[in-house]
């Protein structure tokens, strides 16, 4: 199976899934709080709107169990085709929804239902996309391959925010609120058809195919996971919480924080977010490749330490001026968090054997995502009471980061000790491979 086609299939679906998911986050701050959750108090409207945003995160663990079961029983490819349909269909329908002014409470109810479908679908997409890449990687390239589907996050968000920026530039405020915001959601249908076509041309991953042929398939993957691998499941949850809270702030709530509580315009906030995500597109594959030389754990620890050190300065510098806002956003999100994120797919997946890998990787990651997804509700309340208080917000972030840092220090170096089988060899990848590490053990022994 051609490695380039596998990576394209992994990336294309990931881009579209995250485009749809973060499209909702951007619209929550700019549109939904007004059109679907009107209130005499803007803070209440924002709080309720972000509750639906958090509901999408809460639904993701459900999706991880459903699609993890399919992925570990039937195959990675079958699961990934289903997640694309669920995500794309719900996003398209959001673009057709009537507003509160047109149908009353039915509008927010339908919006919440479609958001939940988005969350369930994304709960199965991320883990499957990562495994499609890592289980097909050549020797010494698993870190690089595992970083490619991670590019779906910045590319998807850049596409989403860019589409809103362009439409906003060519419409009046009234036109944007009346119909302009719908266009990015409707456009997702075109992207989904393209991604389904790409994914339909690939084969199952070699490692899963070997397990299926040998009959080494878990009957109930989630039960096997809790019976044999629950320690690593909870390890992943803790490892993800710290950077996860900061990430949701940097990629979503920053639009509300910067515009409502600091005083930047919508266009300034969108520009800062777009530029930092564009920087991630460069950072992620570079760091992913480096992780095959120096290890995922070392990069993870370094990134968390840097985020702890810059947490309070980040909030102190945002109000100083637009230049500082752009700079700090690019450094924190585009470079430091991107470095952490580039390793997560490979790092976390290397903790599990193939027969429960989809379920373990997805469930651990998505439970953490469900927790951090309600961060915007907490931050809205914090900002309402304290304003844009740097030490309040910075202290909150540091607390989560320290938890993840402690867990990362005591985690295994999965570049050397992994539950993956021998990597797939091919002439196509051997010429790119990193120098071989000392003979890795097949099983984690800790």
Image (cartoon, helix red, strand yellow):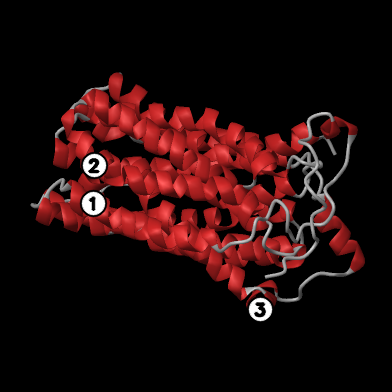
* Number of the front mark, 3 or 2: 2
Query: Mark number for residue 310?
Result: none
Query: Mark 3 or mark 2, which has the lower sequence index?
Result: 3
Query: Mark 3 or mark 1, which has the lower sequence index?
Result: 3
Q: Which residue is mark 3?
A: 223
> From mark 3 to mark 1, how far is it between C-alphas?
38 Å
> Looking at the image, which is closer to me, 212 or 133?
133
The vertical placement of 201 against 105, above or below, is above
**Residue 138 appears left or right of 337:** right
Instruction: Name the residue rendered at 88%, 42% in the picture.
Output: 425
Q: Position of residue 267 (x, y in %)?
A: 26, 26
| Element marked by disc 2 | helix
Instruction: Name the residue rendered at 45%, 59% in the picture.
Output: 404
* Number of the front mark, 3 or 1: 1
The reply to whether the C-beta atoms of the residues labelled 1 and 2 are less than 8 Å apart is yes
Q: Which residue is mark 2?
A: 315
Image quarter (top left, top right, bottom left or bottom right) of the C terminus: bottom right
Query: Mark number for residue 393?
Result: 1
Is residue 262 in view?
A: yes
> From mark 1 to mark 2, how far is it between C-alphas?
7 Å
Image quarter (top left, top right, bottom left or bottom right) of the N terminus: top right
Disc 2 packing (10 Å; few <14; some 14–19; many ≥20):
some
| Total marks placed | 3
């Amino acid at each position: 199976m051609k490695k380039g086609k596998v990576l394209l299939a992994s990336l294309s679906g990931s881009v579209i899934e995250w485009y749809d998911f973060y499209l909702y986050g951007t619209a929550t701050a700019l549109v939904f709080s007004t059109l679907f959750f009107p209130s005499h108090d803007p803070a209440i409207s924002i709080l309720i709107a972000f509750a639906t945003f958090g509901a999408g995160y809460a639904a993701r663990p459900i999706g991880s169990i459903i699609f993890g079961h399919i992925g570990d029983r039937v195959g990675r490819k079958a699961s990934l085709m289903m997640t694309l349909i669920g995500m794309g269909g719900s996003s398209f329908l959001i673009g057709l929804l009537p507003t509160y002014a047109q149908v009353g409470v039915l509008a927010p109810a339908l919006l919440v239902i479609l958001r939940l479908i988005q969350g369930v679908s994304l709960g199965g997409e991320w883990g499957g996309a990562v495994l499609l890449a890592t289980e097909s990687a050549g020797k010494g390239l698993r870190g690089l391959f595992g970083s490619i589907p991670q590019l779906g996050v910045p590319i998807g968000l850049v596409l989403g925010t860019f589409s809103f920026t362009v439409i906003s530039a060519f419409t009046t405020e009234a036109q944007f609120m009346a119909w302009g915001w719908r266009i990015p959601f409707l456009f997702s249908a075109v992207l989904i058809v393209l991604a389904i076509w790409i994914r339909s041309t690939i084969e199952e991953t070699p490692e899963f195919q070997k397990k299926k042929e040998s009959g080494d398939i878990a009957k109930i993957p989630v039960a096997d996971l809790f019976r044999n691998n629950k320690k690593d499941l909870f390890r992943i949850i803790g490892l993800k919480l710290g950077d996860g809270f900061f990430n949701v702030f940097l990629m979503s709530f920053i639009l509300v924080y910067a515009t409502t509580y600091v005083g930047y315009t919508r266009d300034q906030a969108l520009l800062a977010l777009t530029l930092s995500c564009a920087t991630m597109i460069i950072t992620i594959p570079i760091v992913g490749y480096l992780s095959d030389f120096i290890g995922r754990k070392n990069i993870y620890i370094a990134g968390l330490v840097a985020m702890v050190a810059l947490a309070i300065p980040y909030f102190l510098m945002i109000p100083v001026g637009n230049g500082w806002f752009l700079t700090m956003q690019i450094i924190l999100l585009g470079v430091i968090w991107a470095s952490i994120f580039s390793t997560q797919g490979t790092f976390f997946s290397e903790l599990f054997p193939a027969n429960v890998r989809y379920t373990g990787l997805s469930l651990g990651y998505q439970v953490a995502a469900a927790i951090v997804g309600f961060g915007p509700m907490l931050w809205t309340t914090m900002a309402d009471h304290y304003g844009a208080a740097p030490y309040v917000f910075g202290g909150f972030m540091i607390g989560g980061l320290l938890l993840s840092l402690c867990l990362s220090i005591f985690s295994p170096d999965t570049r050397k000790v992994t539950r993956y089988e021998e990597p797939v060899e091919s002439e196509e990848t051997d010429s790119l491979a990193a120098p071989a590490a000392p003979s890795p053990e097949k099983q984690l022994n800790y």
